[in-house]
Amino acid sequence: MVLGQLKTKATMVTKTFNSIEGISCNVVQGSMYAFPNIKLPKKAIKAAKAAGMKPDVFYCYQLLEETGICVVPGSRFGQREGTYHFRTTILPPVEKLQVFMDKFKVFHKNFVQKYQ
């Protein structure tokens, strides 16, 4: 049962992230984490630098402040220059994870519109 739920959650997270314009996510396999790649608008990158933050950190802080969702910036794990990621877990119960994904979709759309 636990493994079946993990598979369901991994599929849900991967499909949801890949359905959002500007985000791509490899299939979650054998771990409890997803590492989506995010394409950030140039204005967001400039706003991050003006705030003294790396762009992925800026994005993650905005996500936390606006939604209460906490993810870890990819720069904390090392990433290629000019790429942006974050790490999130797939462990919450399916119902809570679905709420997270729904909130995330709205946040990302609004973030991109704000910084276009």
Image: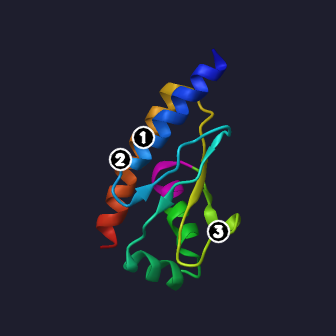
Q: Percent position (x, y) of residue 97?
A: 51, 34
Q: Which residues are magenta?
A: 63-69
Q: Amino acid at mark 1?
A: Lys
> Which element type, helix, strand or loop, lies under badge 1?
helix
Q: Marks 2 and 1, Cα distance to the nearest angstrom?
A: 6 Å
Location of the C terminus (image quadrant): bottom left
- What residue sits right under mark 2 in the picture? 19
User: Main structural element of the magenta stretch: helix, strand or loop?
Assistant: helix
Q: Percent position (x, y) of residue 41?
A: 38, 73
Q: Is residue 75 left or right of residue 38?
A: right
Which one is closest to the eye, mark 3 or mark 1?
1
Location of the N terminus (image quadrant): top right
Near mark 3 (Cα within 10 A), the count class, few <14, some 14-19 or many ≥20, is some
Q: Residue at x 60, y 28 (%)?
A: 6
- What residue sits right under mark 3 in the picture? 75
Residue 35 included in the magenta stretch of the image: no
Q: Marks 2 and 3, Cα distance to the nearest angstrom?
A: 23 Å
Instruction: Tell me where residue 30 sits by quadrant.
Output: top right
Q: Amino acid at mark 3?
A: Ser
Which one is closest to the eye, mark 2 or mark 3?
2
> Which element type, helix, strand or loop, lies under badge 3?
helix
Near mark 1 (Cα within 10 A), the count class, few <14, some 14-19 or many ≥20, is some
Closer to us: 14 or 112: 14
Q: Is residue 113 left or right of residue 49?
A: left
Mark before the other along the chain sequence, 3 or 1: 1
Counting the numbered discs, the total is: 3
Q: Residue at x 69, y 65 (%)?
A: 76
Closer to us: 68 or 109: 109
Q: Amino acid at mark 2?
A: Ser
Q: Check contact, mark 2 vs mark 1: CB within 8 A.
A: yes
- What residue sits right under mark 1 in the picture? 15
Identify whether 51 is placed above or below 11. below
